[in-house]
Amino acid sequence: MNDVLAGKACHIGTGSADILPLDDGGSPSFLGHRPGHQFAGCPAAQHEDVVFYGRALVELVEAGVRGGRPDEAVAALGRLSERTRASGTEWALGIEARCRGLLSDDEALYRESVERLARSRAALELGRSRLLYGE
């Protein structure tokens, strides 16, 4: 695991900033299950909040890929895709392409992400896609 992602914050917008390590090869604790709820340990992904839900799904995709839990990454991507495709913006579709690239390690998807985000105002997301593409 590279040093770019030493941890991720999943408790976005809940009043806490719990940093969950992803560099030990183990499964991140927020990917744990509770009967009846897929993303039990990630409060931001438990409710379809307008602001935080989509962001949490993006983090869950990356955490699932890096934490060796591809099934959970695929599930989070499915929920994210519903939102990004409904939006149809370059920003949303660029983030979706990056998440798909993480799951498939397809260079074309990283390039699509960078191209789409370059046409948006999402400078931080563009930087993140460029970093992931450069890995």
Image (cartoon, rainbow, N blue to C red):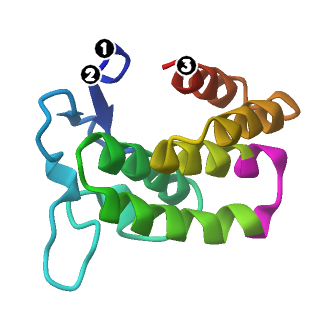
| Residue at which label 2 appears | 6
Question: Where does the magenta region start and end?
Answer: 86-93
- Give the number of the disc on residue 16: none
Q: Secondary structure at mark 1?
A: helix
Q: Tell me: residue 87, above or below residue 15.
A: below
Q: What residue appears at the point 66 percent right and 48 percent down from the top-left corner?
A: 97
Can residue 134 be found in the magenta stretch? no
Residue 17 coordinates in the image, percent (x, y): 28, 35
Q: Tell me: residue 108, above or below residue 45.
A: above
Q: What distance separates the C-alpha of mark 3 from that of mark 2?
A: 14 Å
Q: What residue appears at the point 11 percent right and 41 percent down from the top-left corner?
A: 26
| Residue at which label 1 appears | 3
Q: Nearer the viewer, residue 32 or 14?
A: 32
Mark 3 vs mark 2: give the one in front: 3
Left or right: 27 in relation to 64: left
| Residue at which label 3 appears | 131
Left or right: 108 in relation to 7: right
Mark 3 / mark 2, whichever is N-terminal: 2
Q: Residue furthest top?
A: 3
Q: Secondary structure at mark 2?
A: loop
> Pointers 3 and 2 in contact (CB under 8 A)?
no
Say which amino acid is labelled 1: Asp
Say which amino acid is labelled 3: Leu
- Near mark 3 (Cα within 10 A), the count class, few <14, some 14-19 or many ≥20, is few
Q: What residue appears at the point 30 percent right and 14 percent down from the top-left corner?
A: 3
- Near mark 2 (Cα within 10 A), the count class, few <14, some 14-19 or many ≥20, is few
Image quadrant for the N terminus? top left
> Pointers 2 and 1 in contact (CB under 8 A)?
yes
